[in-house]
Image: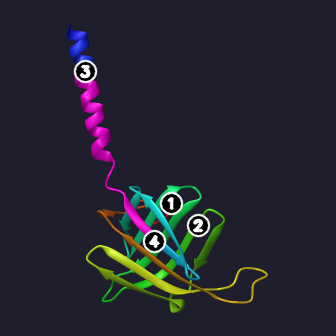
């Protein structure tokens, strides 16, 4: 009898822990040259960096991801933005080509993306997503280098 109850308690605890670990699904919208796509996932991570910038990472599966790096000093400045949606992908590393806004914990990034190899025209894009919670980045290396004071 004890074994059955212990097993039941562990099963209930495991199910409760799994349910707590999975957050609410967030819709991330990608509009690329007027065509709209949606990534729906609970796997949205918003990480505050040591330099006070923020990295937003959305992963539904390997072929559907969004990564946004932005600064929040005084105003929202998008430093980098990239996405992959099945066969479509793009990246912008020039902050001059993007604008960003934040309302509550909802972020919108708009901008121009340079043409890929073999293309002539720039692309327009918008990415809209939300941060369900924030976490602080872990320092990469706290051990001093050899020879440093």
Residue 57 among those drawn in magenta: no
Magenta residue span? 9-28
Which disc number belongs to residue 31?
A: none
Mark 4 lies on residue: 29
The residue under label 1 is 146
Q: Is residue 113 among the parts visible in the rendering? A: yes
Real-space CA distance between mark 2 and mark 3, rounded to the nearest whole angstrom: 42 Å
Chief SS of the magenta region: helix
Q: In which quarter of the image is the C terminus?
A: bottom left
Q: Is residue 8 above or below residue 72?
A: above
Q: How is the image coloured?
A: rainbow
Residue tagged by mark 3?
Answer: 8
Compare marks 4 and 1 and give the one earlier in the sequence.
4
The residues tagged by marks 2 and 4 sit, at their Cα atoms, a distance apart of 12 Å
Label 3 sits on a secondary structure element that is helix
Alpha-carbon span between mark 3 and mark 1? 53 Å
| Left or right side of 93 for 127 | left
Q: Where is residue 34 in the image (x, y as percent from the top left)?
A: 55, 82
Q: Can residue 52 be seen in this view?
A: no
Image depth: mark 4 or mark 1 in front: 4
Mark 2 vs mark 3: which is more N-terminal?
3
Residue at image coords 50%, 73%: 30
At 49% from the left and 62% from the top, the residue drawn is 145
Q: Work out whether mark 3 precedes mark 4 in sequence or the reverse, and give the earlier one.
A: 3
The quarter in which the N terminus is drawn is top left
Q: What's the CA distance linking mark 2 and mark 1?
A: 40 Å
Q: Which of marks 2 and 4 is nearer the N terminus?
A: 4
Per the rendering, the mark at residue 84 is: 2
Cβ–Cβ below 8 Å for labels 3 and 4? no
């Amino acid at each position: 009898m004890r074994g059955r109850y212990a097993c039941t308690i562990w099963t209930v605890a495991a199910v409760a822990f799994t349910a707590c670990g999975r957050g609410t699904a967030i819709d991330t919208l990608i509009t690329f040259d007027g065509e709209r796509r949606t990534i729906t996932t609970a796997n949205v991570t918003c990480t505050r960096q040591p330099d006070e910038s923020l990295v937003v990472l959305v992963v539904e599966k390997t072929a559907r991801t969004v990564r946004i790096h932005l600064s929040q000093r005084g105003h929202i400045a998008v430093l980098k933005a990239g996405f992959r949606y099945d066969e479509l992908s793009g990246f912008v590393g020039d902050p001059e080509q993007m604008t960003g806004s934040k309302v509550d914990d909802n972020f919108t990034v708009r901008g121009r993306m340079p043409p890929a190899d073999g293309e002539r025209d720039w692309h327009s894009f918008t990415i809209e997503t939300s941060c369900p919670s924030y976490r602080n980045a872990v320092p990469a290396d706290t051990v001093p280098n050899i020879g440093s004071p």
